[in-house]
Every structure is written in structure tokens, then in C-alpha cells.
Image (spheres, rainbow, N blue to C red):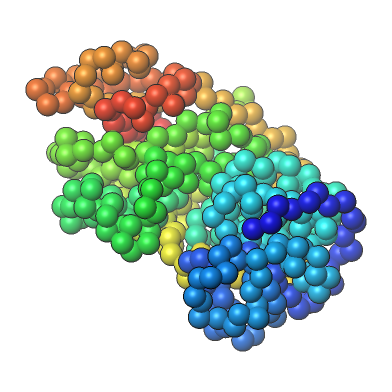
Amino acid sequence: METLSQPSITKNRKQENGTRQIIGLFGFGTVGKGLYHVLGSSPTTKATIKTICIKNPDKERDINTNLLTTNAEDILNDPEINLVVELIDSATDAYHIVKAALLKGKSVVSGNKTMLAHHLEELIQIQQTTGAALLYDASACGSIPVIRNLEEYYDNDLLLSIQGILNGSTNYILSRIFQHGDSYDVALKQAQDLGFAESNPTFDVDGFDALYKLIILAVHGFGTYVHPKEAFHCGISKLNDHDIQYAREKGKKIKLVANLSKLDNGRFTLYVMPRLVNPDEYIYNVEEEYNGVVIEGAFYEKQFMFGKGAGGFPTGSAVLSDITARYHDYRYEYKKQRYFEPLTYTNKVIVEVYFRYTSPADLSHFEFEQISEKFSGKESSWLIGTIKLSALQKIQDLLPKLDVFLALTGRSE
């Protein structure tokens, strides 16, 4: 894909409500194909794909080749195209495409959570300058419209927390382990064979995907942008039979849970970690590639949203919803930033964790505040203790190199 030149800023003229969407689509992978077929099955949708920008022109595709191009400028410089839909893998290329389109006054629909988590603050400012709109409901929870609900239904300062399963790939793996007795390696291979996990699964199983989604939700939930490097995350890649046995003995399952919580004094925290989940919790029965999000407020208490979080058609449907929203001139207002005092992010929070390790040398890297239980065995050892998120943040890059697994007990949340 060609490198994009930096365009000049042009003031966007407000789109007329009901103008047919002429789409320039970037990417024709799983989600792009899903969108293409979903659009074909929705004759009432006022949208047409005019051009599709692809990376590999030699790849066989069951589609009219007249729609295809390898030159990004064929979309960005086409005055007839009034909506750019970005569905490519590369976060770097996605950033340049989305930024260039917005600066040219073209509205954009994107599903690239990595790009958004790293550049959303800047892209919000560009929207305010040009009047173009950027929609990305598909980036957060697949088919669950969490972002739009935060913008419209929860557009007040009563929101207390958002917790849930935001990654369908890891949830599928954990479901195979706890429901079907598969080992981690077997479950991961099945997820890869079904297209839920990549050949290199690090993005999903180490919690990056869920973290990036949570950062996006924080902007709409609490009005504050947090850079990914400032937030702690860990995943399930070091999960082994000892951890699975421990959870089963306690009558619990292990889920990879994203947490966004309001604290006192105008502060909030966010993090992604495995958690021991009780049978009476909403997310306990969220299985396979599904996502489940629990939103809690000061007076409306807990509300639960559930839907598929992986796969081309669920995500393609979410993209279609954004396309339809733009037909009606919908845009995010970022109400928590405009009408309320944004909360301040902190990682100076103490959490209680189950911590399994093999070597005492690995244990020495962790600054536990207090240890309430401890077990030592020949093959592995574990403890229950409290630790600051800021202390875990310090050794974030070291964690993948250690033979350890940690999971929230859930008792301190």
C-alpha cells in the first residue's frame, strides 16, 4: 500500500442527512468480506462500495475486480466517495489512512482498536477541526454496541464501572479448557483453526486486544484518554494445569477480564487481567467466542450486554451499523469530555491476586503488600496476596519472560 502524503486541512461541509453513502473500503480480509456480504444482504441500506483498496493484487478473490485498487489515493482523492471504511490489519497504515481521510473532510468508519488506542486523542481533535466524523463501534466488542450506549444512554456522571470479557479469542480458549477439559495448547490450536486466533496469538492471549478496547471505552465512559503504556495488562499465555486445577477446586472458572472502575476523589483505574470468576457472576456463563460486558451505575445498578466478539459477520454487522448511523449524520459527541470534568487515571490501586510460580527467583520480582495464603510444592507453588497495580506496571515487560501466572481473586474489586 502506498505511503500517503500529508494532505492540507479542509473544512468539511456538513453531510446532508440521508445522503447515500458511497464507500471506499480499505481491506478485504475476514471483516471486509463480512461487511461486503452483509451489505449485499441488506438492500434497504443506503450504501454502495465503489472502491476496495487491497494490499495483494495477485490473490484470488470472488469479487468484481473492477472494484479493486492498490493505490490508497484512488479512494482518498475521489470526490464521489463520502465515507471511508478502514478494516486493515496494520495499525500504522490504518492511522495514516484514517488521518488523511479526516483531514480531507471524509467521514470514516474503523474497526482498528490498536490504532485507535494509540491515536484517539489526536483523531478527536481532527474531527473537531474538519467537521468530519469517525465512528468505531466495531472496535470495542464486536457485535455489542457498547460505545454508542456509553455516548447516549450513559451520558451522565453516574457510571461507576465497566467490567467484562472483551476478547472472544481468549474466551473461546478458556471455554474449551473449563467446559471440555482441553489443554491450553489444544484449545489454542482449535481457536487458530477456526480463525478466532492468529498464528501468532500474542495480541489476544497476552491481553493487548482487551486493553486497547478498554482504553477506547474509557474515553467514552469517563472522558479520559490513557496511553496503552500507562495501563497494566497480562493474559493467559502462562496458564497451566496447576492453575486450572486450583480454579476447579474453588468451584470457579478463569476468565480474562477487563476492568474500568471509578474511584474516589475524581479518579479511575483500568487494567486487564485473568480473574477467578464465581458461578453467580454474569460473565461466568459467557462462553465460546462471545463477549459479555457488565455496566454498573450509581442508581441503575448492574446491566449486562452480551454478544459475539469474534468473527467476520458479527464485526461486519457492527461496521454496517456505523455506516447506517452516518447515513443519519450521527457522530460521537464525546459528552464526558465536553460536559463533565474528566476523571484522572491512576494505577496506585491495590488488588488481591492468585500467584503461581515455580522458581523463588521469579517471586523476588514481585513486591507484595501482604500474603494471606501460601503453598509450596515440588512442581509449582502459589500464594494469595495483595499488590499494587503500579508495582506490576514496573515489571510489565518482564512478565512474559517469567514462568508465573497471576489472576485476580475478585475479592478486592
Q: Is residue 158 above or below residue 359?
A: below
Relative to the observer, which residue lies in front, 396 or 180?
396
Would you place residue 41 above or below residue 243 in this image?
A: below
Q: In the rendered image, is residue 318 in sight?
A: no
Q: What residue appears at the point 27 percent right and 55 percent down from the top-left corner? A: 189
Q: Nearer the viewer, residue 89 or 196?
A: 89
- Quarter of the image that includes the C terminus: top left
When asked about the image quadrant of residue 317, the answer is bottom right
Q: Is residue 50 left or right of residue 8?
A: left
Q: Residue furthest left?
A: 378
Residue 116 position in % (x across, y down)? 62, 47
- The picture places residue 277, in percent across and down from the top left corner, at 30, 42
Q: Quadrant of the N terminus?
A: bottom right
Residue occupying the point 23% across, 15% down:
360
Quarter where residue 13 is shown: bottom right
Q: Is residue 144 visible?
A: yes
Q: Nearer the viewer, residue 149 or 404?
A: 404
Q: Residue at x 28, y 18 (%)?
A: 362
